[in-house]
Amino acid sequence: MGGDDAMSMERSRRARFTNVAPTAGEFKMAALLAGVFFFLITPLVVQALVGWATTGVVALPNGHLLDAYGGLLRSDFGVGLPDRVNAGLPSDAVMWVLTLVGEVLVLGAVVVVGMWMRDATGASSRHGLATPTQAAEALGLPRLRKSAAVIRPDLYARSGRRTH
């Protein structure tokens, strides 16, 4: 067996034992960033939808994003929107209630999609593999140690073993 073949087999063996699923920490960080993004964008989407429902014009505060968020911090919806759309918006109290409903819907959607993605990618799961404690209980610690090279050849390969 040539040197290239042995290297290729070793690379192939390593690739089989490499976990490419996102870790639980990576998954939590992605969900957190998505949640913050959707939390910040929801008031603007709500005012755009209400503006569309009242005036028939879909308008976002294009080019006036900082002004729009400043207006929201002062409880003033419609900042950065065309005057026609701004005039058609209901009172700020109604807009805040609608925004709260929108935030709850978005939060629910983020949780559902996040749980689906976690299950689909296998993050925070072992894809049916036993934990070390479960394996020790099932096999017994002496047998587990004796079979380590078979169970995890990537970690416990026997030295001096011939590869051909």
Image: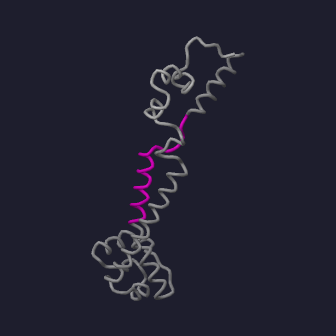
Q: Nearer the viewer, residue 156 or 103?
A: 156
Q: Quadrant of the N terminus?
A: top right
Residue 163 screen position, x and y as percent: 66, 16
Residue 128 sits inside the magenta stretch: no
Above or below for 94 versus 146: below
Residue 80 screen position, x and y as percent: 39, 77
Total number of numbered discs in the rendering: 0
In percent of the image, x 49 and y 46: which residue is there?
123
Q: Nearer the viewer, residue 40 or 85?
A: 40
Question: In the rendered view, does 68 fall on the left or right side of 23?
Answer: left
What span is colored magenta in the figure? 18-39
Residue 92, by quadrant, is bottom left
Query: What residue occupies the far left of the structure in this picture?
Result: 74
Residue 63, by quadrant, is bottom left
Question: In the rendered view, does 5 fall on the left or right side of 98?
Answer: right
Residue 24 sits inside the magenta stretch: yes
